[in-house]
Amino acid sequence: QVRLVESGGGLVQAGDSLRLSCAASGRTINEDVAAWFRQIPGKEREFVAAISPSGNSDFYADSVKGRFTISRDNAKNTAYLQMNSLKPEDTAVYFCARGLEDGSWRRGDDYPYWGQGTQVTVSS
């Protein structure tokens, strides 16, 4: 089994930066796509970013492109989301998703492993 633990969320002002981390434990999973999703209460889960197993390819939602950067350190079994120029509309609970080997990078249902989420709040 794989356990994911996110960290790095918090309360910041518009224009600030945050770096989220997603540490995987249990079974080493490096041959997988890693992704970040976010969800606002009452709304559907939204794809944010995903990265290939090697880290050579990444993909972003239009709403975060140019501001967020996803990365991974396979030696540490950890994925990251660097968030710059944060906006109030980025406020959400951010979830790490791992374990995708064959499926759509944007579809949350294709990821077998999920973290508990970390709250990001951006004030104006």
Image (cartoon, helix red, strand yellow):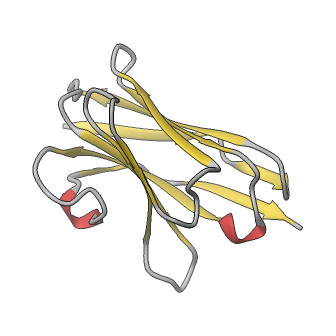
Tell me which residue sits at (22%, 24%) in the image: 28
Image location (x, y in percent) of residue 30:
23, 27
Snapshot quadrant of residue 74: top left
Q: Is residue 122 above or below residue 46?
A: above
Foreground residue among 116 and 35: 35
Tell me which residue sits at (43%, 72%) in the image: 45
Q: Is residue 72 above or below residue 37?
A: above
Q: Residue furthest toward the bottom?
A: 42
Residue 103 located left or right of residue 88? left
Residue 124 located left or right of residue 26? right
Snapshot quadrant of residue 3: top left
Image location (x, y in percent) of residue 19:
64, 37
Tell me which residue sits at (50%, 83%) in the image: 43
Q: Residue furthest toward the left?
A: 102
Residue 122 located left or right of residue 117? right
Q: How many marks?
A: 0
**Quadrant placement of the N terminus:** top left
